[in-house]
Image: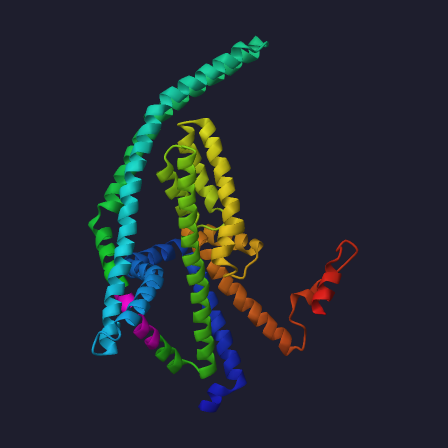
């Protein structure tokens, strides 16, 4: 029986069977996509406390490790045993990590929610005045036009547009804001289930932080028992690389976004642009999304400022462009370096594809996920080429012609 399992034809047959089963599963998933999606959403809803806890623990892990490591060095000679010192350090590190997390969340809510309310109120109060100013400007322009027929058409178009804007704000915008706020308050903030999931998530986060070493050992134990040693080592290597790619990118991007938000707040305060705290939070949060983040945050922010002052909205857009260049060329590379190993094209590719499939979450995690795929795909291709006795460097497969000025000479000089 053992010879049968180790035979070449048995492995080939098992491979075809697994591939066929996978195709059947994928076909069933595609044909019943709505049912599959509903089932997946139900599963995610059930395990959401553990997802919250894992995400919180993963983000707080650097803080937890830093406090544990340094506090243990200070207290290891104070306690009778190193085990007690280590346990004390872990307990304090857990408290510090949770205090930081809850402090950031509560602080942002305390700062941002009043700003949102005042911004909406200010926009509503300023809208009639801005409409009157715009009406005065259009009247002044049309009164100076020589072609009275065109001027009359412009005034007619503006009067109709003004009536439609007022009707839209009265019949759609204001009731819509009320419905949105009601849904947010009833379904997200005030629902007992969501609050309970978050509380359970915090508890799960504590377990993850304090038991991560044991969980890691248990996973290694299971993998070692199920796979051969070389296969198990490859799985461990994959886990370490994925952790490095995700941890380095996500942590670096959060630090980068905090710096950009602070710079945005200071700049807006210096130039006295409206709503500096609210706008800076929007810019900082959306900056977590690579490439498109600054522009996603700039659009609603510019619209908010536009209701106060059109010229200040223009100044803000110029500020966002400067911040994007500063982040892309100086701050981002200094913090992130080349943690993903992806070129700009593949970064854009991963954001578009994963964002289209999974929404905003996909735009955030798409880059590190694709970085892992790209790394292992390249590793597999290089291994196949070496097995065939071929060159595995990409430069060896480039073709040169008369339009490739200096590229071949540069490569030859690098080889020398």
Relative side of 64 to 11, left or right: left
Residue at 48 percent of width and 74 percent of height = 17
**Location of residue 109 in the rendering, given as x and y in whole percent from the top left corner:** 28, 44
Residue at 40 percent of width and 45 percent of height = 262
Residue at 53 percent of width and 45 percent of height = 325
Q: Which residues are magenta?
A: 206-218
Q: Is residue 346 above or below residue 217?
A: above
**Location of residue 152 in the rendering, given as x and y in whole percent from the top left corner:** 52, 11
Q: Is residue 164 above or below residue 287?
A: above
Relative depth, front residue between 173 and 31: 173
Report the magenta stretch's main SS: helix
**Location of residue 79 in the rendering, given as x and y in whole percent from the top left corner:** 21, 75
Which image quadrant is residue 58 in?
A: bottom left
How was the colour assigned to the protein in this rendering? rainbow
Q: Quadrant of the N terminus?
A: bottom left
Q: Quadrant of the C terminus?
A: bottom right
Number of numbered discs present?
0
Which image quadrant is residue 214 in?
A: bottom left
Relative side of 119 to 88, left or right: right
Residue at 46 percent of width and 68 percent of height = 241
Relative side of 162 to 206, left or right: right
Relative depth, front residue between 393 and 83: 83
**Location of residue 299 in the rendering, given as x and y in whole percent from the top left corner:** 45, 37
Relative side of 181 to 386, left or right: left
| Residue 207 lies within the magenta run | yes
| Residue 292 in view in this figure | yes
| Residue 73 lies within the magenta run | no
């Amino acid at each position: 029986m053992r010879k049968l399992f180790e035979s070449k034809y048995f492995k080939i047959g098992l491979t075809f069977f697994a591939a066929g089963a996978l195709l059947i599963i994928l076909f069933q998933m595609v044909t019943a996509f709505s049912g599959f999606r509903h089932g997946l959403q139900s599963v995610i809803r059930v395990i959401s406390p553990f997802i919250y806890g894992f995400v919180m623990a993963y983000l707080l892990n650097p803080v937890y490790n830093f406090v544990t490591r340094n506090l243990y060095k200070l207290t290891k000679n104070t306690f009778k045993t190193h085990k007690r010192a280590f346990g004390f350090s872990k307990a304090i590190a857990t408290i510090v990590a949770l205090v930081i997390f809850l402090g950031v969340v509560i602080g942002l809510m305390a700062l941002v929610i009043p700003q949102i309310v005042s911004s909406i109120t200010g926009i509503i109060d300023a809208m009639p005045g801005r409409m009157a100013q715009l009406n005065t400007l259009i009247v002044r322009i049309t009164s100076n036009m020589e072609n009275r027929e065109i001027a009359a058409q412009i005034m007619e178009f503006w009067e109709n547009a003004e009536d439609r804007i007022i009707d839209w704000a009265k019949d759609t915008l204001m009731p819509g804001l009320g419905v949105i706020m009601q849904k947010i308050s009833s379904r997200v903030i005030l629902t007992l289930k969501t609050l309970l999931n978050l509380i359970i998530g915090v508890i799960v986060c504590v377990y993850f932080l304090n038991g991560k070493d044991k969980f890691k050992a248990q996973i290694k134990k299971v993998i070692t028992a199920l796979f051969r040693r070389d296969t198990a080592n490859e799985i461990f290597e994959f886990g370490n690389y994925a952790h490095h790619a995700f941890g380095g990118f996500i942590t670096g991007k959060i630090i980068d976004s905090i710096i950009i938000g602070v710079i945005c707040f200071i700049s807006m305060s210096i130039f006295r642009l409206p709503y500096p705290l609210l706008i800076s939070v929007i810019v900082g949060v959306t900056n977590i999304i690579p490439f498109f983040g600054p522009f996603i945050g700039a659009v609603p922010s510019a619209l908010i400022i536009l209701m106060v002052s059109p010229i200040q909205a223009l100044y803000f857009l110029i500020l966002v462009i400067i911040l994007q260049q500063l982040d892309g060329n100086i701050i981002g590379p200094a913090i992130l370096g080349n943690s993903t190993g992806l070129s700009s094209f593949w970064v854009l590719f991963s954001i578009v594809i994963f964002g289209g499939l999974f929404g905003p979450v996909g735009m955030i995690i798409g880059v590190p996920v694709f970085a892992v795929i790209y790394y292992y795909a390249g590793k597999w291709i290089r291994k196949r080429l070496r097995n065939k006795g071929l060159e595995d460097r990409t430069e060896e497969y480039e073709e040169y012609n008369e339009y490739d000025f200096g590229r071949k000479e540069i490569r030859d000089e690098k080889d020398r």
